[in-house]
Image (tube, rainbow, N blue to C red):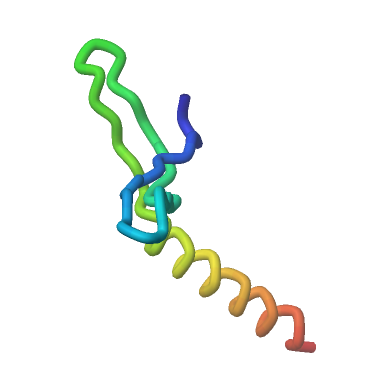
Amino acid sequence: MSGGPIFGFRKEPGIGERYWLIAVQSRWGKHSHEIAACPTKLLGEFLMYFVEQQKIHDQTP
């Protein structure tokens, strides 16, 4: 399903299991079973830029 989260998992001694949101799925090949995904770091940077641009736009007369 497009838009689904992709998590990374790791066991760390003394801490236990940890997990992170790595990417958001953007496409799935029905026959190849391959996916395409947008890394969350890239997505986060874009969203921060977009929000900042909206703030600037909203402040202009």
Give the quarter of the figure containing the C terminus. Answer: bottom right
Q: How many marks?
A: 0
Of all residues, the one furthest to the right in this rendering is 61
Residue under the image location 50 percent in, 36 percent down: 3
- Name above or below for residue 34 compared with residue 15: above
Of all residues, the one furthest to the left in this rendering is 32
Query: Quick check: 26 left or right of 30?
Result: right
Q: Give the x, y percent position of residue 17.
A: 40, 48
Residue under the image location 44 percent in, 59 percent down: 43
- Name above or below for residue 5 compared with residue 45: above
- Name above or below for residue 27 compared with residue 29: below
Q: Nearer the viewer, residue 23 or 48?
A: 23
Q: Give the x, y percent position of residue 48.
A: 54, 72
Query: Quick check: 10 left or right of 56?
Result: left
Q: Nearer the viewer, residue 59 or 33?
A: 33
Of all residues, the one furthest to the front in this rendering is 14
Q: Give the x, y percent position of residue 34.
A: 24, 25
Query: Quick check: 28 left or right of 57?
Result: left
Residue under the image location 62 percent in, 72 percent down: 51
Q: Nearer the viewer, residue 18 or 15?
A: 15
Residue 36: quadrant of the picture: top left
